[in-house]
Image: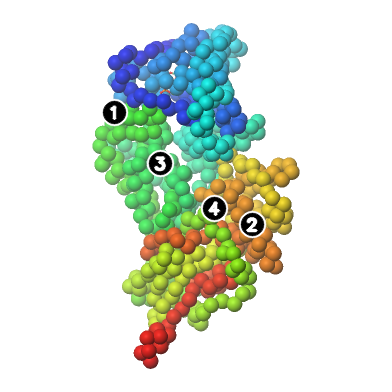
Amino acid sequence: MKIIKVLPEGLIDRIAAGEVIENPASVIKELVENSIDAGAANIEISISGGGKDEIIIVDDGEGIPKDQVELAFYRHATSKIRSWEDLLKTFTMGFRGEALPSICSVSLMELTTFYDGERVGSTIKFDGGKQTFFGPAPPRKGTAITVKNLFYNVPARRKFLKSELSEKRKISEVIRRYLIAHPEIGFKITHDGRPVSSLPATKNLLERLESVWGDSITDNLVELAGGPSGPMTIHGYVSKPEVTRSSRGEIFFFVNRRPVLEKSFFGAIAVSYGTTLPPGRHPYAAVFLEIEPNFIDINVHPAKTEIRFADDGFMFTTLKKSLDKALALPLGFSLRSSTEPRLGSQTHNGPQTIPFGRARQEAFDERRLSMIPGEPASFESPVGPVMTSPQIDFVGQAASVIQLFDTYILARQNNEMLIVDQHTAHERILFEKNLNSFEIQGMPSQKLLFEEQVHLSPEEQSALDTAGGLIARAGFELRPFGGDQFIISGVPLDMGGMAPAEALKETLAVLGNNLRQGQELKLALAAAVACKAAVKAGHRLSEAQMRALIVELFKCREPYRCPHGRPTIVVMSRDDLEKIFRRK
Ligand SMILES: Nc1ncnc2c1ncn2[C@@H]1O[C@H](COP(=O)(O)OP(=O)(O)OP(=O)(O)O)[C@@H](O)[C@H]1O
Ligand SMILES: [Mg+2]
């Protein structure tokens, strides 16, 4: 029999205190955790107005016995622990007995629940913390909670809530943690009355990751495996270094299934991937640590997203070892092949496999670059000085590369000096990649958990109409939503870190511009996406990234100019220099 009790004073004092209800996302976090603790097999989450108007969570868990429903809303009342010793060995998400009273004091809240074995259920209602109703309810398995008008009675806090869109993003971030932590739970998510996601329960983590990330990501994951190491076992998946995004938002860590945001875990990721990731890029990861509870302390912060380890050095080393092992899987990527230009003749004597395909890192962090006004936007415009021979002898480890003004890469190639414009070069690489994938299967798309509604101007709509079905091949998943409104449900993978509406609008703007220049649709769209996703000027690159960029550039069919005709490389020969310095 489940028994909710108020914790003894001494214990209350030892539990990390503090308010955890800051926004709709934190309400959802607390309520979903309660449903998980109640053993739910299915959880439904509905939000309206970005969670500011209404949040409804329905589960099919064990429910609350009738005589304890009121008690559940008392401060420090919990069924999950009784003593300090319990806290040290708890596996439950909750233990403070704080969430329900905190939420009910700042909203209109209603809870309907039914406890197995009883004859009827109960409904209880609160208005700003004051109980307004308690009575019987039909015996429907589980618990349903409605939270309306969050912070309606604390205007100062309601004022601090962000726009609906931004609250929705935070909610999506929180929900994704639980979707991944609990594949065995089926989730249904509804937004403003529209079902947006339905994830069936599965025993298979990879299957759940596919529902959350899409198969273009899950096809590029490596598994973290390994037996127990002392009191700890690690499992999960991380992405190959060529699949990256601009935020850490898709790196998930779970300790005993609890989502945690531990700095040292992110540190282990950063160290293991090392320079294989371009700056500002991060992998996808779902890392699960199972550890005996007495080796950790989750009572650090009231939100319980931080954890203390009895031996954090051991935790870090074990995690890093496991990551290193997974990431060191040979991917069979060769720096040299007979069909490619000759690379690195000074140090690479024959085909060489490098871990993670360093040379394939074409995704860089670029968010806002737009065409430089007044630049000739023609695919055919004359180009600057170009090399006459595609034979590149540059990438020998001995040849140095230098970044100038965070914009240009200086490199030596035999008797010539190359000056590469990092943005136009990257644009060219992405442009050819995009064109290729239009031909094959279309560009991979990053699915959005919450679809986004976007308003398109007449010019944007006209560019969209012209693009027709090709917009989907570019990785944008879109549908009309009446008038000038559209719903975005996916964006091209290379733009995964951009705000979806911004990614679409900026791409359409460049596309419209390219079309006005008379470009053929396919080229114009491939160029527009490349322009938005390419690394911009002013972005610091590591030496490995500069080398990778140049290697990739010389694999292009037309390495010497960007899709708009601007030069990607300027060459000065030793001869030219000698003339300048009047050596000759
Ligand atoms: N969805 C639910 N199904 C069944 N019981 C629930 C549910 N939500 C809450 N309860 C009961 O109400 C009690 C109080 O919930 P509340 O979230 O306030 O505290 P907690 O989960 O024990 O601790 P924490 O404040 O750390 O979340 C829980 O201990 C649990 O017994
Ligand atoms: Mg709780």
Label 2 amino acid? Answer: Ala
Give the image location of residue 58, x and y in percent: 56, 24
Asked if 457 appears above or below 353 in the picture, the reply is above
Packing grade of label 1 (10 A; few <14, some 14-19, many >=20) is some
Pick out the residue farthest to the front: 156
Question: Taking 554 as reference, is 188 left or right?
Answer: right
| Mark whose residue sits in front, 4 or 1 | 4
| Residue picked out by circle 2 | 509
Q: Residue at x 55, y 23 (%)?
A: 152
Amino acid identity at mark 3: Val
Real-space Cα separation, disc 1 to disc 2, in angstroms: 56 Å
Badge 3 local density, few (<14 within 10 Å), some, or many (20+)?
Answer: many
* Quarter of the rendering containing residue 56: top right
User: Could you say which is closer to the camera, residue 349 or residue 548?
Assistant: 548
- Mark 3 to mark 1 CA distance (whole Å): 20 Å
In front of the other: label 2 or label 4? 2
CB under 8 Å between discs 2 and 3: no
Q: Secondary structure at mark 4?
A: helix
Disc 2 residue: CB within 8 Å of ligand 2 = no
Relative vertical location of residue 468 with respect to residue 293 in this rendering, above or below: below
Q: Position of residue 496 (x, y in %)?
A: 53, 50
Q: CA distance from mark 2 to mark 4?
A: 15 Å
Q: Which residue is mark 3?
A: 287
* Distance CA(mark 4)–CA(mark 1): 42 Å
Which residue position is annotated with label 1?
294
The colour scheme used here is rainbow
The residues bearing labels 2 and 3 have C-alpha atoms spaced at a distance of 39 Å
Quarter of the rendering containing residue 99: top left
Query: What amino acid is at disc 1?
Result: Asn
